[in-house]
Amino acid sequence: MEIKSLKKYLLNEKSIAPLVVFRIAFGVLMLASITRFIYKGWVHSMYIMPKVYFPFYGFEWVKPLSPEGMYIVFGLMLVACVGIILGAFYRLSAVLFFLLFTYVELIDKTNYLNHYYFISLVSFLLIFIPAHKSFSIDNIRLKKQDSTSAPAFYLLLLQLQMFVVYFFAGIAKLNYDWLFEAQPLKIWLPAFSHYPVIGSFMEKEWVAYLFCWFGCIYDLSIGFFLFNRRTVNIAYVFVIIFHAATALFFNIGMFPYIMMTITIVFFKEEFHEKIINSLIKITGYKPNSTNTAYTPLNPHLLNFFMLYFVIQFVVPFRYALYPGKLFWTEQGYRFSWRVMLMEKAGTAFFFVKDEKSGRESEVDNKKYLTFLQEKMMATQPDMMVDYAKFLKEEYKKMGFTNPTVRAQSYVTLNGSGSREFINSTIDLSSQSNSFLKNKSWVKSY
């Protein structure tokens, strides 16, 4: 498609209904997710209880607030969700939710999940999308007309973001372990052999291969079928099947339900208009009037999001800049839509040495780390560096002179057997997590 034709398509007026339905669905899902997070006690266990946190490189300045402050943050997120659902103070609500949610995720990479990253990105997009121009409290409050349309550009933003998730999840599955060893599903599926009816199949090797190949083909192709108006309905059936299966077999929280719900953004406009009309009848919403006038699109916004998606398409491939096996070194692993691709576990023993006296002490990790933090740290090199730097400062306070920190770590990847993970002679506390430096101290796989 020529640039001129593409611009013409992006400026083409489409029904605003898909944007409004997406706004409401996303707000409801986030309201449920944040409520669940608070109810489960995860605010306390993840952001109050830990003695040490593992910030993302470049975001070391992001710190948790006091216990009361963290609960206020989550409370404000709930308020922002309600604002998004109702279209009340919409821009402020969208900005507030994006900033608070992203802030929480930046505190500790122990808790990183692809779908949290996805939620941050979508909430960022919502800031710019005029999803409150119809069926909203803002229109009533400000006595504005309800828009009937918006440039196709805004709808494409949401659809393309979802396409990126699916497509790169498929690209990530194009590896030997997944396709030809059926790992890690060959390890995981037998754990469900107690399920009625289907349980007897879970120990069959061919089932693991079936799941792997279906998952790969699904992720690579589903975005294209969703974009096609002739295949979107049958594609959505596969969306339901795929995510229902992931919800059944894997403990990945709200993610399957989020994807099943917001994928309806690909549905035809008539579907969304019926939903809006039903909601208008239920709520008795009365717009001031409707506005069918053309909505101009800021060209700077167009250029900005072209750059945004270029970055989205490049970032997953940054792992190629580093030597070694990606699943082993994890350099370039995060922010690349690699979902449930490996079974990795390990143990790490840390030793702090007083350089003046030569005395070396073994660290009791449980004294400083939560169970989840220790589990994640033991297999992720950058978290080991963070922990070593923390220990260095901690032992300085205990009177150690110029302490050095080394670790012995043993890791198993996709059932390959336990192997020594890092060079146990180096001072981890003096290593850098800079993206520009290869972690050469991680042993070859």
Image: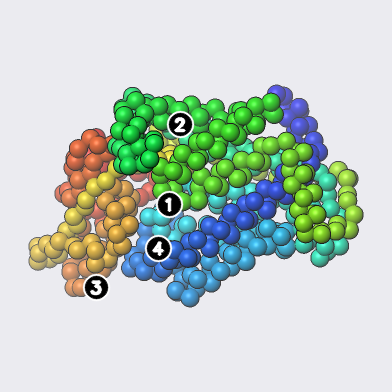
Depth check, mark 4 against mark 2: the one in front is 2
Q: CA distance from mark 4 to mark 1?
A: 11 Å
Image coordinates of residue 98 in percent, x first then y, are 59, 57
Q: Residue at x 50, y 61 (%)?
A: 36
How would you rate the neighbour count of disc 1 (Cα within 10 Å): few for under 14, some for 14-19, many for 20 or more? Answer: some
How would you rate the neighbour count of disc 4 (Cα within 10 Å): few for under 14, some for 14-19, many for 20 or more? Answer: some
Q: Residue at x 57, y 56 (%)?
A: 30
Q: Nearer the viewer, residue 91 or 32?
A: 32
Q: Identify the residue position indicated by label 1 in the image.
A: 112
Depth check, mark 1 against mark 3: the one in front is 1
Residue 439 appears in the picture as rendered: yes
Q: CA distance from mark 1 to mark 2?
A: 22 Å
Per the image, label 2 sits on a secondary structure element best described as helix
Q: CA distance from mark 4 to mark 3?
A: 25 Å
Q: Identify the residue position indicated by label 4 in the image.
A: 46
Q: Identify the residue position indicated by label 2 in the image.
A: 215
Answer with mark 1 or mark 2, whichever residue precedes in sequence: 1
Q: Nearer the viewer, residue 54 or 25?
A: 25
Image coordinates of residue 79 in percent, x first then y, are 62, 66
Q: Seen from this angle, which residue lies furthest left?
A: 358
Q: CA distance from mark 1 to mark 3?
A: 30 Å
